[in-house]
Amino acid sequence: MAQLRQDGYEVVEQFYEPDALGAALRDFDAVIIRSATKIKEPQIDAAKDSRLKLIIRAGVGVDNIAVKYAEAAGITVRNTPRASSNAVAELAMALLFSCARNISIAGHTMREGKWEKKAYSKGFELAGKTLGVIGYGRIGQLVGAKAQALGMRVLSVVHRNKPEGVESESMRFVSMDELLAQSDVICLCAPAGEKPLVDAQSIEKMRDGVVIINVSRGANVDEGALLEALNAGKVRAAGLDVWLSEKDPNWALAQHPAVSCTPHIGAGTKEAQKRIGAELVDIVEHFGT
Ligand code: MLT
């Protein structure tokens, strides 16, 4: 924000209740929001035919904005898709290591003064294992590259456009059923769709002892089905950064001993935040030029 002020923009940093937000936006040319603020149909109805011409999501996911509705009302929606990809991909790897070596629960028990060496010495190595990445966009491709560097074989699924130049001896596109059946670890990097990617039916098709990582959106996982599969031992471990209900997540899942979890901090690195800031300034300064 300092850069925008320095460049002569008037910047107001303020929280508005959802009911007041739409009308308040009428006084601004552009609004920058993060994930917690929703700009849906009611806010757009209240803000349309005013000064507001640009909504910027400081981040990747635009699921908190009614994008098509805003654009039909003449309001452009932009995000910062490149800035946080590496930060999210690195967190996926951190959760993967934590699941493989019981780091989260082993550290937790040590904080309780317990030396559980025997219990947590039954980890597994990532080298030689197969990672299924669902969603091979910017974040998915970075996860895939890091996994290959660790000696993992990577599988993904093509939805619409197959990314160019990513297939190799250690990376292949397969059908969803093949990915589910062959992966030792499955990492979700896709935007939320109409139904969860991980639910009772898809879990059934996975290997026994599979590990599931989710750095995408909570809605991609049926949390009840995952909890049941963890309790049954079908899923060995899960690494979760995103939740169906954030701030008040499924605590039974978050507190499960086989779950390594974080409170949606995928983009939370100083490098990513700096890049997001630079991308925001660029969007504002070049909007309409
Ligand atoms: C994003 O969509 O940019 C990420 O999930 C990070 C976030 O919203 O906090």
Image (spheres, helix red, strand yellow):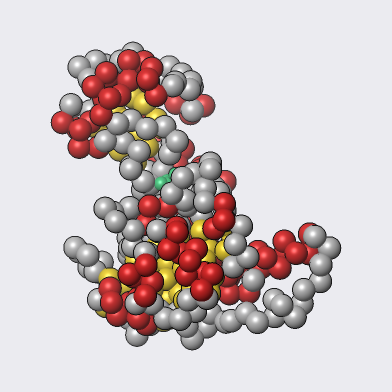
Q: Residue at x 24, y 15 (%)?
A: 50
Image coords of residue 152 (percent x, y): 46, 80
> Is residue 277 something that shows in the picture?
yes
Quarter holding the C terminus?
top left
Instruction: Relative to 50, say whether 168 is above or below.
Output: below
> Is residue 172 something that shows in the picture?
no
Image coords of residue 1 (percent x, y): 49, 28
Label tally:
0
Report whether 189 appears left or right of 287.
Answer: right
Figure quadrant of residue 276: top left
Image coords of residue 122 (percent x, y): 65, 82
178 or 227: nearer the eye?
227
Figure quadrant of residue 94: bottom right
Q: Residue furthest left?
A: 72
Q: Residue at x 62, y 79 (%)?
A: 123
Report whether 288 appears left or right of 261.
Answer: left
Q: Residue at x 48, y 66 (%)?
A: 228
Instruction: Relative to 20, say whether 100 is above or below.
Output: below
33 or 100: nearer the eye?
100
253 or 94: nearer the eye?
253
Q: Residue at x 45, y 58 (%)?
A: 223
Image coords of residue 269 (percent x, y): 56, 49
